[in-house]
Image (cartoon, rainbow, N blue to C red):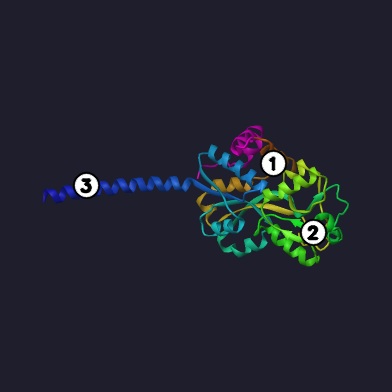
C-alpha cells in the first residue's frame, strides 16, 4: 500500500512538472512569429529584415525563412507561416489572395505607388510594349523574366498574348535577371526585363518602364502585409505594429539602397536603419500592454 501511495504521489508530481513545462513552452511558442519572404524580391527582403529586428528588440522570437511565392501563400494559408509583408495588389497577387482568402487576414499597407511591368535601359529608343516586335532583333529576340509562379511572370504571359509578342519569354530567377540587366547596360546593349518598383535597380541603373496601353500590368499598386487567419487575435500588439508599418518613397529608397550597398549581414543593416529612424520606428509600435 505504501508503495502504491508513493507511486501515486510521484506520478502526480511528474504530471505537474510536465504540465508546468508545457504551459511554459506554450507561452514561448506563442511569442514566436514566423515570417517569410521571396529570395530576390529586394523590397520584401528589406522590410522583413527590418521588421524582424524591431520585433526582436520588443522581446519576440522571430523565425524568418524564404520560399517560392506559391508555396509561401499555401504555407500561410495552412498556418505554417504567420506573416508575409510583400503582397502586391490589386493586380500582381490578386489570384493568390483570392485562392486562399478564407484563411488569410489583411493587416495593412506598407507602401503605395508600386509598379510592375517591362523595363528597359533609358537609352533604349523604344518606349512602348507595342514596339517590341519591331525591335526584336536588337533584343536578341527575348524578354528576360524572373521565377515561374511570380505575379509579374503571370502578367507577362498575359502580355505576350495580348500584344502578340514574337519574342521568347525566358524565366529564371531575380538574381539571374539582374545579372543579365547589369551585363547589357555595361555593354550599352538593349535588353527588356520584367521589373518592379520599388527596387534598388532603379537607383543603380537609369531605367524606364515601357508604356502598357492595354493595361495588362495595371496601374499603381500597393504593397501590403497579409497574415494567416487568427494572427490578429494571437498577436494583437504585433498585428498593430504590422498595420502601422509604412514607408514613403524616400524612406523605401533609402532602406533599399542601404540594404544593397551595406554588408552581407542584412540584419546589421536593419539595426543601423532603426537607430537612424528611431522616431519613425517608435511610431509603428503601439504602447499598450504586450501580447
Q: Which residue is mark 2?
A: 141
Tag in front: 3 or 2? 2
- The foreground one among 146 and 43 is 146
Viewed as shown, does residue 187 lie left or right of 37?
Answer: right
Q: Percent position (x, y) of residue 109?
A: 67, 51
Magenta span: 263-291
Viewed as shown, does residue 74 lie left or right of 166?
Answer: left
Residue at screen point 80% across, 56% down: 140
Q: Which residue is mark 3?
A: 10
Residue at the far right in the pictured view: 125
Residue 270 magenta-drawn?
A: yes
Q: Percent position (x, y) of residue 153?
A: 70, 59
Q: Is residue 192 above or below residue 54?
A: below
Q: Which residue is mark 1?
A: 256
Q: Percent position (x, y) of residue 28?
A: 44, 45
The label number, if any, that marks residue 145 in the structure image: none
Asked if residue 90 shows in the view, the reply is no
- Is label 3 in contact with label 1 (beta carbons under 8 Å)? no
Tag in front: 3 or 1? 1
Q: Is residue 23 above or below residue 54?
A: below
Amino acid at each position: 500500500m505504501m508503495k502504491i501511495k508513493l507511486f501515486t504521489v510521484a506520478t502526480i508530481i511528474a504530471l505537474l512538472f510536465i504540465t508546468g513545462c508545457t504551459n511554459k513552452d506554450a507561452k514561448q511558442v506563442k511569442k514566436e512569429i514566423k515570417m517569410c519572404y521571396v529570395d530576390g524580391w529586394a523590397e520584401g527582403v528589406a522590410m522583413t529584415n527590418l521588421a524582424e529586428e524591431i520585433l526582436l528588440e520588443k522581446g519576440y522570437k522571430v523565425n524568418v525563412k524564404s520560399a517560392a511565392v506559391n508555396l509561401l501563400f499555401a504555407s500561410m494559408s495552412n498556418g505554417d507561416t504567420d506573416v508575409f509583408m510583400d503582397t502586391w495588389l490589386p493586380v500582381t497577387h490578386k489570384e493568390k489572395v483570392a485562392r486562399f482568402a478564407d484563411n488569410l487576414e489583411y493587416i495593412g499597407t506598407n507602401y503605395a505607388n508600386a509598379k510592375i511591368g517591362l523595363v528597359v535601359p533609358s537609352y533604349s529608343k523604344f518606349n512602348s510594349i507595342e514596339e517590341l516586335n519591331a525591335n526584336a532583333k536588337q533584343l536578341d529576340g527575348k524578354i528576360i523574366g524572373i521565377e515561374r509562379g511570380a505575379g509579374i511572370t503571370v502578367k507577362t504571359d498575359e502580355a505576350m498574348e495580348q500584344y502578340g509578342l514574337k519574342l521568347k519569354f525566358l524565366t529564371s530567377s531575380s538574381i539571374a535577371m539582374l545579372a543579365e540587366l547589369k551585363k547589357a547596360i555595361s555593354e550599352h546593349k538593349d535588353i527588356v526585363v520584367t521589373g518592379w518598383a520599388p527596387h534598388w535597380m532603379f537607383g543603380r541603373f537609369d531605367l524606364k518602364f515601357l508604356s502598357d496601353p492595354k493595361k495588362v500590368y495595371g496601374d499603381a499598386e500597393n504593397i501590403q502585409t497579409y497574415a494567416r487567419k487568427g494572427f490578429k487575435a494571437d498577436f494583437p500588439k504585433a498585428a498593430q505594429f504590422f498595420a502601422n508599418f509604412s514607408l514613403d518613397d524616400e524612406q523605401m529608397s533609402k532602406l533599399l539602397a542601404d540594404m544593397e550597398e551595406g554588408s552581407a549581414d542584412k540584419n546589421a543593416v536593419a539595426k543601423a536603419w532603426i537607430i537612424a529612424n528611431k522616431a519613425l520606428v517608435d511610431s509603428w509600435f503601439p504602447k499598450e500592454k504586450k501580447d
